[in-house]
Image (cartoon, coloured by chain):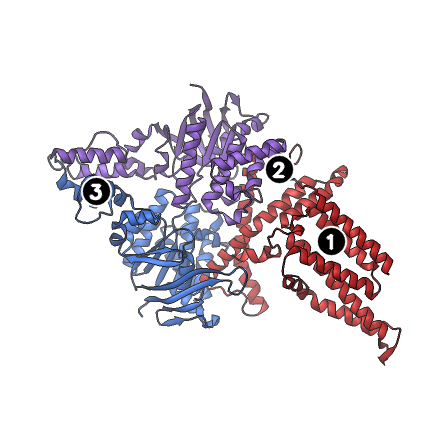
Amino acid sequence: MVMDITFKDVGYTYQVGTPFESRALHEINLTLRDHAFTAIIGHTGSGKSTLVQHLNALLKPTSGTVTIGDRVITPETNNKNLKPIRQKVGMVFQFPESQLFEETVAKDIAFGPMNFGVSEEESLKRAKEMVQLVGLKDAVLERSPFDLSGGQMRRVAIAGVLAMKPEVLILDEPTAGLDPEGRRDIMGMVQRLHQENQLTVILITHLMEDVANYADQVVVMENGGVVKVGTPREVFSNVQWLRDKQLGVPETAAFADQLIKKGFQFKQMPLTETELADELLPQLPQAGRNDNVE
Amino acid sequence: MAKIIDVTNLNYRYPQQTEHPALKDVNFSVDQGEWVAIIGHNGSGKSTLAKSIDGLLPIGEGDSGTIKVGGITLTEDSVWDIRKKIGMVFQNPDNQFVGATVEDDVAFGLENHGMPREEMVTRVHEALKRVRMLEFAKREPARLSGGQKQRVAIAGVIAQQPDIIILDEATSMLDPEGRVEVLEIVRKLKEEENMTVLSITHDIDETENANRIIVLDDGQLQESGTPEKIFAYGNRLIAMGLDVPYAERLRTALRKRGTIVPAQYLNEEGMVDWLWTSHLKM
Amino acid sequence: MSNKLLLGRFIPGDSIVHRLDPRVKLLMSFYFVGIIFLADNWQTYLFLFLFTMVAILLTKIKLGFFIKGVRPLIWLILFTVLLQMLFSSGGTVYWSWGPIVISSYGVVNGIYIFMRFVLIIFMSTLLTLTTPPLSLADAIESLLKPLKVIHFPVYEVALMLSIALRFVPTLMDETEKIMNAQRARGVDFGEGNIFQQMRAIVPLLIPLFVSSFNRAEDLATAMEARGYQGGEGRSKYRVLSWQLADNLTILAFALVTVVLVILR
């Protein structure tokens, strides 16, 4: 089945009909394609988290429709029939290690699949697979999740979501608070899941480097609306626009922008340092090739 | 210059994990008015080091070494005097916000020292002005962003007028805007008050303003030197679980492609200028 | 967002009632409960009703918020009123069946009791609607101060209360976040029979406990780093100031007492 997710005129308002009513989303029209790697960027409070909670029906729109695969969700949809969507669309929240609660890592990972009717035996088997998939050793399976390091706990939490075998994986700032090595490991793993396991990935992030390196579609949000959708190169080419919106700029684009201001010219906006180096190469004096390679 | 922090032969183990030492024979000192950045991956012992300087860790058998702050040796008797000289900002913005409102939180440390109210009011006002949070004085923490909460924590430090500020991964849970705001305030504090700064981080970009960087790995001091020296390590930084600054990554990428590159580490500005001058030579 | 509802009992404003010293409001609320028992005829009840309405008017808060305060207790009130009506005798008897008698005396008493409940609820709602929880904590601290003589840890209790209040919204957010995370893993909260619902609570409670303990540990370290050594020798930043309006409020309540005594 094709798991495209489509938003049509979606709006969401918190606490409708109370004095504390506040509009979080308005007029969202958006398609997230099956098997794509989409990054959602925007300021804290721009509506990113509210938007993604519609992707697995944790929230229902207060206006408009959300279509997830063949399921159509409207404001009137009955809450009872939403559960199967949550199995298909897995969600890793920010600091997901705070959701761990079982006595052992194995039991915690098996918790999700068992809630969706998978047998205990099969769930524990999946736990073993997933632990390897997230790069942990089998030995952690029988340990208490609370005895692990922060980075390990985060992997266990991600494994717990993967064990439901979702087709779509949503990650809300999966590397927040991790050190550079932990960040590289997690993002490498997400990329593998996307490429090898064909998962559709939706990543909320503040880190423009990750967007430049991994995403093939970028959604820019501001004040509860979508202000731009495009490939990373389309979105990051206009450095001035990003600065005006006070969004981050990938290091390479920022650096290239300084070079352009000096007078360098590039065929297209480079997004990684290797792209930039390739573009710079013909514009710089050369030593004998490969003389200085480390 | 006077050594304001002097750590000699520090060894430390956490009570629960006696088999694996958290700090092994650490020696270092910080001069008055210096900004020293301690960098290392998670679990390298950097936070333990920060907390031990403020006497915040339970001491057990086998822990050894001397810590001197402003000439006073840290002991059970002197710990409260030493804490007066040091202001600490911790990692989690929520878990260090004691007061029910912004101004209450800034005043908390002053209340502890029994300061008369009139003086507290002036100090709280001044401190909030310094971190540009004055208009939020009556706000509750639930209505602040992470970056704003950390600025309040810094205001709490400023109000106490310590000699040293220790930032224990104070930016690691913030979004990029919050991070920039906090670092900007610390930079100003250092410049205007000549405050001694000890910043603990795993983000190499945050160390570029330091006078000196200390690299910690597995509880041991690995390297110490100016940012220029440390940044030029390139891939050795990756091996230590860290990042390489952008300008250095570009220098490496160019060298691999056979371009003549400068022999030294250049910061971004220097790199841009150098590229432009070389381009003109073609 | 949801935390606003919980602390929604307090409605920010700048009325004269909002600005009163919380100690006065707290003391007078208790005092009101006492003097309401002086009322024993329709004149006194009418007088108290008018007094309460004037107080509500002064808060500049809609009457609806006060009526909402009655709603959760309405069944208890009606039950009490009914008992009073059915089991007290005297005056003209309208109807009787065994021990159950409906008399004029019972009906009037029932109405009085109803009034008493509603007025007490209105007055206590007025206290919580116009006083932030933190100010109430301050008032309690200030009023408990004499207990220091018997070594009651007033400062510590007050600080505990203030920290607890400060962390209510934080914990509410945390609860919501963990609930969402577990719902995403297939937990149904609030569905199924009691047993299923209790089981659904475990994956919520354990993470909440763990995170609260971590927070407490961090907070203790942060407090220690900022020189906290217990209540002794601390000064106070937040002070309560007794103003003319507070004295006038006490005077007003004294007058009400006098009028009640005259009218009864």
Secondary structure category for the residue under label 2: loop
Q: Residue at x 18, y 40 (%)?
A: A263
- Of the numbered discs in the image, which one, if any, rests on residue C29? 1
Do the residues under discs 3 and 2 have CB atoms within 8 angstroms? Answer: no
Label 2: chain? C
Marker disc for residue C152: none
Q: In the depicted view, which residue is nearer to us: B220 or C180?
A: C180
Using a 10 Å C-alpha cutoff, classify the residue at mark 2 as few (fewer than 14 neighbours), some (14 to 19) or many (20 or more): many
Q: Quadrant of residue B123?
A: top right
Q: Amino acid at mark 3?
A: Ile
Above or below, comparing residue B178 to residue A171 in the picture: above
Pointers 1 and 2 in contact (C-beta within 8 Å): no
Query: In the image, what residue type sits under mark 1?
Result: Ser
Q: Secondary structure at mark 1?
A: helix
Q: Give the colour of chain B.
A: purple
Nearest the viewer among A187 and B2 is B2
Q: Chain of mark 1?
A: C
Three-letter code for the amino acid on which mark 2 is drawn: Tyr
Instruction: Residue A195: give x, y in percent of width and height.
Output: 27, 57
Q: Which residue is mark 2?
A: C237
Q: Are marks 3 and 2 on the same chain?
A: no
Of residues A220 and C67, the one nearer the viewer is C67
Q: Which chain is blue?
A: A
Q: Colour of chain C?
A: red
Q: Which mark is residue A260?
A: 3
Image spot of residue A25 (x, y percent): 42, 61
Task: Kindly tell me whether residue A73 is visible in this rendering.
Answer: yes
